[in-house]
Image: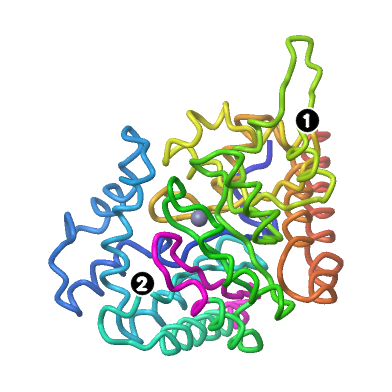
Amino acid sequence: MPTRDQLLRAPKVLLHDHLDGGLRAETVIELAKQCGYQGLPTTEPVALAQWFASDVPRRDLVRYLEGFTHTVAVMQTKDALERVATECVEDLAADGVVYAEVRFAPELHTEGGLELETVVTSVLSGFEAGMAAAAANRSPIVVRALLTAMRTAARSLEIAELAVAFRDAGVCGFDVAGAEAGYPPTRHLDAFQLIQRENFHATLHAGEAFGLPSIWEALQWCNAERLGHGVRIVDDITVATNGEVALGRLASYVRDRRVPLEMCPTSNVHTGAVRSLKEHPIELLRRLRFRVTLNTDNRLMSDVTMSKEMGSLCEVFGWGFADLEWLTLNAMKSAFCPFDKRLALIDSVIKPRYAQLTAESLRTSHAP
Ligand SMILES: [Zn+2]
């Protein structure tokens, strides 16, 4: 079992993290003061952090999404967006993340009169500032943005165009998020077709609270390269009492094509998609060698970091460095940044640092 310190030092790759789900509680409070937002349930940082993570007994996606009303309310100015983005990068770097794709929905940040473009440039300049600070702190990190369109709204084509417009300025792809039931991804076909025509990248929240049809549409109609969560793919897998496993056609496709699954186990427990970490299909999918990646989703709402998430899974499933390295390599291979950059991070950062950690843990386990 890796120690906490080793988990912190392990290099991590994060593909699924929401900017408006990862604020520091103190920052939410300070920004609320600055913009005159009165809606926070409390203005005491520890209590507020607990409030955000307190939906666990309810385990419902709709309630979980309520927390975002507060974070989004305080992210309506250039300065607020830049600050949140900078702190996000600093927090990820401090957690040992070496590459991250952080997503946000520009259309949610125009309440205060900001243009969509300004929302994007503010976040990107925050990312730049955070990366510079992390590099100066000797924990370099590469952070790229994914632009999310809300599946319940009708602005996806505009957001896809925006993502393409900023592709050389720090945006690496497009995503669609929000309540799944009743809002199939095929409502946003024109946006996904634009992404395809532009040779750009798309991931899609699918198969989180909703089943196989959502995953099938994401892959076969929207050409999503990765699945946000994708956890319901287990509905197409049967495990017999003798342990024999049979994959349906869709599950076979996902595994054969190495479709990356952006899995967020703790978040899935909090939203009610899965009952407990122990029952989370990530272990079965890992054993079956699907292209599994490990992610935080919403660090504030789920009170998680990558290190914590790795630690919990090591504890629950008995994983070790070999598993963590495999997940990290899967994520790096599935990133939307160019192939040569992915290879460079794999060869010069991820593999050597896991080799070092593995050697270190072998030494300790053989110590008298
Ligand atoms: Zn998500």
Residue visible at 81% across and 18% down in the picture: 244
Which percent across, then down, holds residue 16? Answer: 57, 59
Q: Could you tell me residue 154's position as x and y percent?
A: 42, 69
**Residue matched to label 1:** 247
| Percent of width and height locating residue 273 | 48, 37
* SS assignment at label 2: helix
Is 199 placed left or right of 179 in the picture?
Answer: right
Residue 75 position by quadrant: bottom left
Q: Is residue 153 magenta?
A: yes
> For residue 92: magenta?
no
Disc 1 element:
strand
Q: Nearer the viewer, residue 171 or 189?
A: 189
Q: Residue furthest top?
A: 241
Q: Where, quadrant-wise, is the C terminus in this rendering?
A: top right
Q: Are marks 2 and 1 in contact (CB under 8 Å)?
A: no
Q: Classify the position of the N terminus by image quarter.
A: top right
- Report the disc number at residue 256: none
Q: Residue at x 31, y 35 (%)?
A: 58
Label 1: how many Cα within 10 Å (few below 14, some 14–19, many 20+) = some
Q: How is the image coloured?
A: rainbow
Residue at the spot of label 2: 108
Measure the C-alpha gap from mark 2 to mark 1. 39 Å
Q: Is residue 269 above or below residue 258?
A: above
Magenta-tinted stretch: 134-159
Above or below — where is 254 with respect to 176? Answer: above
Asked where in the image residue 73 lies, by quadrant, the reply is bottom left
The residue that appears at 25% across and 82% down in the rendered structure is 112
